[in-house]
Image: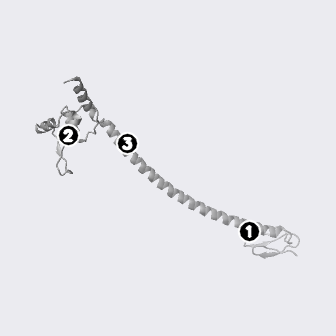
Amino acid sequence: MSARSAQQYQSARSAPSYQPDAALTFKEAAEAAGCSVDTIKRRHQGGTFPHVFQDAGDKRGTWLIPVTDLVAAGLLGADALVDVAETVATVKHGREAAAVQTALESARQDLALQVAALRAQVTGLEAQLARVVDERDFLRGLVTATTGGAGIGAGTEVGTGAGTGAGPGSGTGSGAVSGTGA
């Protein structure tokens, strides 16, 4: 074999990389191995490729040779196969990424539910605060009305029970404001 044909043979053998589950037609196998299609056919007839199969999706019934058979027969170097560990890691990484994506989506949905519940709680608390502020303002108005020079004496009770006042002009009574001044 001349130096040039050896170089062509070597470049044809080492150039492409294939997945371990890849399969090639006779022509593709011959090109990848740097030999003739007739050599591939003879090897096939001689039983060199134990896993050869016909393409079920092809109406012509094209024969396909697994790349692993070509490597086992010595027609392709083992370096023609993509590192299986790298392929497995890539697939595993893809699965992990999908699992992480699913977990993130689930967490996102859980957080959205929690945010909605918290917003509803805030709305309820704001309404409760508004009622308390209204009640406070009402009570301030009552206190201001009872102590602001309306003639009501000190010690007047505000509430539902009866109350008595002590001091000038105090009286007795019941209700929200008790006692009136004279």
In the foreground, 68 or 137: 68
- The answer to which quarter of the image holds residue 125 is bottom right
Between 35 and 84, the one lying in front of the other is 35
Rendered view: 151 above or below 89? below
Q: Position of residue 165 (x, y in %)?
A: 82, 71
Kind of residue at disc 1:
Phe
**First in residue order: circle 1 vs circle 2:** 2
Measured in 3D between alpha carbons, the distance from the residue under mark 2 to the one under mark 3, in whole angstroms, is: 34 Å
Give the residue at x 50% y 56%.
Answer: 112
Q: Residues within 10 Å of mark 2 (few under 14, many from 20)?
A: some
Q: Which residue is mark 2?
A: 27
Indicate which disc residue 118 carries.
none
Q: Which of the two discs, 2 and 3, sits closer to the camera?
A: 2
Q: For marks 1 and 2, give the CA distance.
A: 96 Å
Name the residue that disc number 1 marks: 138
State which quarter of the image contains the N terminus: top left
Secondary structure under badge 1? helix
- In the displayed structure, 63 sits above or below 154; it is above
Depth check, mark 1 against mark 3: the one in front is: 3
> In which quadrant of the rendered view does residue 33 lie?
top left
Q: Quadrant of residue 134?
A: bottom right
Left or right relative to 33: residue 44: left
Task: Tell me the distance, in whole angstroms, between the alpha carbons under discs 1 and 3.
Answer: 66 Å
Q: Quadrant of the C terminus?
A: bottom right
* Residue 29 % position (x, y): 21, 38
In primary-sequence order, the first of circles 2 and 3 is: 2
Q: Position of residue 156 (x, y in %)?
A: 80, 69
Residue 153 lies left or right of residue 41; in this view the side is right
Tag shown at residue 93: 3
* 10 Å crowding of disc 3: few (<14), some (14-19), many (20+): few
